Image (cartoon, rainbow, N blue to C red):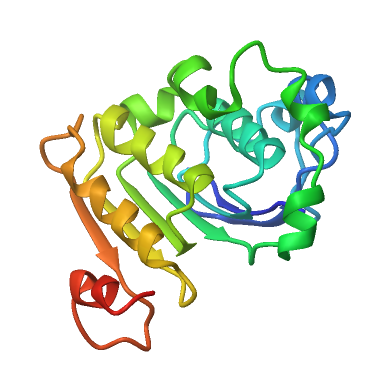
Amino acid sequence: MILLIATIMNLEKIGLCELQNEHDDLINYFGWPVQTPVNYEANDPMEDLNLFMNLRELTIDLDLNDRREMLILCIVLQRCLSLHQLEINIEESRSEIEEATRDYSSANNRLPYPETKLWEKRGLCDCITFTLKQVSIKGFKGKDGEMEFPRHLITKGAKLKRIEIWCNHDCSREGGEATLGLLSLPRSSIDVSILLKPPPQFDGSFGRWVSTLN
């Protein structure tokens, strides 16, 4: 399940919403519409359809390794035309058995390109190009599916000022080294700072923490 917490242009909190009831794109891809937040009342029917247009801050819980959830994130960001801050909390990964048996076919069969090319092939979101300034990603493990989105942000986010990536306590050494590789990517924004953070319980630099991993 994907959960959103959003703040509109005047910083009024519009609360928690489930991505379940309202957009044609979500219906076409997944049979999922988007539901308006419980404490949000639209004065005009079109406000419901454009719920994300004026968002300035967005917090979302999802699995960056899940193609289905990444497609939903992409669709949401395409509608967030004024987004300044984005926070992603990566959900705890499934067990190895669940991971091995998870069926991506329903989402992947709808894509006319390899799933690893999702952000590259869908084109740029306006918010990533023109408005997004701060991004925080928590629970990162440096897996292939997770790496795709921060790579896209670093190489395409022209207005970015700051990206923070907080690694999870059970990140592998391979994942930590892959995360370090983000620092060497060409940056679309000359002002962006990329901050890699070890788990809170580790007192030391990110590079030192990676050297302790198995």
From the viewer's perspective, is residue 122 above or below residue 165?
above
Q: Looking at the figure, which quarter contains the N terminus?
A: bottom right
Q: Quadrant of residue 21 in the image?
A: top right
The C terminus sits in image quarter = bottom left
Taking depth in this image into account, of 105 and 90 the one nearest to the observer is 105
Snapshot quadrant of residue 104: top right
Q: 168 left or right of 64?
A: left
Q: Position of residue 73 (x, y in %)?
A: 60, 38
Look at the image and tell me whether residue 2 can be seen: yes
Residue 116 falls left or right of residue 16: left
Q: Where 113 sits versus 115, above or below?
A: above
- Residue at the spot x=21%, y=37% of the render? 185
Q: Residue at x 25, y 48 (%)?
A: 181
From what the image shows, is residue 117 above or below residue 131? above
Of all residues, the one furthest to the right in this rendering is: 31
Number of dots carrying numbers: 0
> In the image as oriented, which residue stretches furthest toward the left?
190
Q: Is residue 42 left or right of residue 152?
A: right
State the image coordinates of residue 199 (x, y, percent, origin top left). Answer: 38, 78
Is residue 39 visible in the rendered structure shown here? no
| Left or right: 25 in relation to 54 | right
x%, y% of residue 60? 59, 53
Point out residue 34 in the picture as x, y percentages from the top left corner: 79, 37
| Residue furthest to the top | 112
Q: Residue at x 38, y 59 (%)?
A: 174
Q: Nearer the viewer, residue 120 or 208?
A: 208
Residue drawn at (30%, 32%) of the image: 157
